[in-house]
Image: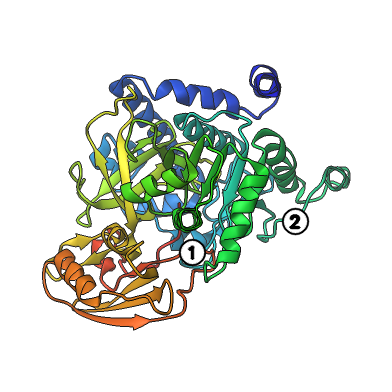
Amino acid sequence: MKKAILKKLLLPMASKLTSNKGWDYYKQYIVSDFDPIETRKKRQWNKLKRLIEHAYTNVPFYRNKFDKAGIKPEHIKDESDFRKIPVTTKKELRDNVSKEYTIAENYPSKNLRFSNTSGTTGPSLILMHDHEDINYKYASKLRSRHLMGCDIEDSIMRITSNECQPCLPNGESPDVGFLKYLQMVLSNHEYKQQAYYILLENKIINPFIHRRHFSKALRTYFNNEDMEHYVKEIKKYKPDMIVGYPLYLFFIARYIKEKGIKLTPIKAVELTAGLSFDSMRSFIGEQFKAPVYQIYGGCELGRVAGSCVHSNGLMHILEDHAYIEFIKSSGEIANPGELSNIIVTSLNSYGMPFIRYEHGDVGKYFDHQCHCGRSAQLMDVEGRIMDLIVNKDGVPLSSQVFIESFLGYKGIKLFQLIQKNLNVLEFRIVKESPLANINIIEINNKIKEIFGYEVNVEFKYVDYINPAASGKYRLVRSATYESFRCVEDKNQELGNFW
């Protein structure tokens, strides 16, 4: 009954009577996934052209970037012209955002929603979103849940160390209740608009619409006390859906199997902010008794892709929301199934545009269509650029191939592969138990098979692997990834995404 009231009355009324149009945009996204390819591509290109013209006219950062490259909006007639725009990096945006150099001059910053990235591989970036951008990002989230067969008001338990949160311009996200917000409005506080977004998400959307429960982050050791805590919370809250980092959920699933724990089946497991692969998803699904789905996006962009029940882990790109390029380090378009850089343009971000944004990941696109009937292009993500190893023959090896080979390997609780140079690797191992027997020769042979030649592997046993400040783990660290990037300054630091 509550769900029907929400879907048939409250959300449609909000879209009709207020500026919160996310429900309407979600319904449009659901329909557009089945549009003829050419119809949607034409609409996508028109959105892209409008965004470019807006950015050049109103955003000093992009106007300067275009002028330095000798490009004007009127010069961009097709996709090859668009690729002449230099790629934008997170460092560029972070270096300029404090000066409001990256903010559209016709979008006063006092009216924008502030949020911050999680800072996995560097300092976080304060983001600014205009209200329409927020509506579209919310619609993209609902669309990804729709692909999974989940519905509005399904309860959610989130198992991540953090997530993007609305915040004040200084990066703080205080608790804002109705009374505090009212006081800020009456006093015309300079941060009243930002407080509104904090209130809306934390006091209305999360508890009443999505019924979200946030669980504590796992500790470094992934010990049984943490695992038991999550199992108890799952049993207590009985969520319809569990959302979490793939590695976190893998460890919880392994604990569930080891202890023979029986859980009530749920509707779906959503893997976010990390890499997964077929066997990992299958294992997690078996233990949680639920289908497992992968989504892709970021705080900057919303959810740009998500898998469905028929796509076998591949993700449908939301082409009305984002324009995604799969680019080789040469700047050329990759072929279907070829590992490449993922470069994203957010089509609805006008307050703080993201144009040809180096998203920090590598992946592939595919030219076949899914059995579900959606005509949107399919993609896969195979890891971070920073974790991609380019061997001495110039062959790129994504972190996925190593993680798939050694995560869950007999006797290994956790590992980290560090490339020191082209011929030397350090393989750190956290044992499942002090007496665990690790087959070093077998691991060495597997690494040789992956590289295609003999490399010097230094094995090191450690008590734990340190996560990044965000709680995410880099299981592969590369010394050769720079050559695979498609930016002019290949030494410029990367951001953190998902």
For the point 37% across and 54% down, the residue is: 358
Which residue extends farthest front? 260
In-image side of 14 versus 85 (left or right): right
- Residue type of the residue flagged with mark 2: Pro
Who is closer to the viewer here, 203 or 231? 231
Secondary structure under tag 1 reads loop
In-image side of 80 versus 314 (left or right): left
Residue 259 in view = yes
Callout 1 crowding tier (Cα within 10 Å): few <14, some 14–19, many ≥20: some
> Which quadrant holds residue 458?
bottom left
For the point 54% across and 57% down, the residue is: 117
Residue 388's disc is: none
Which residue extends farthest top? 8
- Residue type of the residue flagged with mark 1: Thr
For the point 70% across and 43% down, the residue is: 197
From the top left corner, tell me how far across and down residue 448 is, in percent: 15, 70
> Which quadrant holds residue 179?
top right
**Compared with residue 271, is residue 152 higher up or lower down, i.e. above or below?**
above
Who is closer to the viewer here, 55 or 498? 498
The residue identified by callout 1 is: 120
Per the model, the C-alpha gap separating discs 1 and 2 is: 22 Å
Colouring style? rainbow
In-image side of 18 versus 409 (left or right): right
From the top left corner, tell me how far across and down residue 380 is, in percent: 31, 45
From the top left corner, tell me how far across and down residue 258 is, in percent: 46, 58
Of mark 1 and mark 2, the one earlier in the sequence is 1
Residue 174's disc is: 2
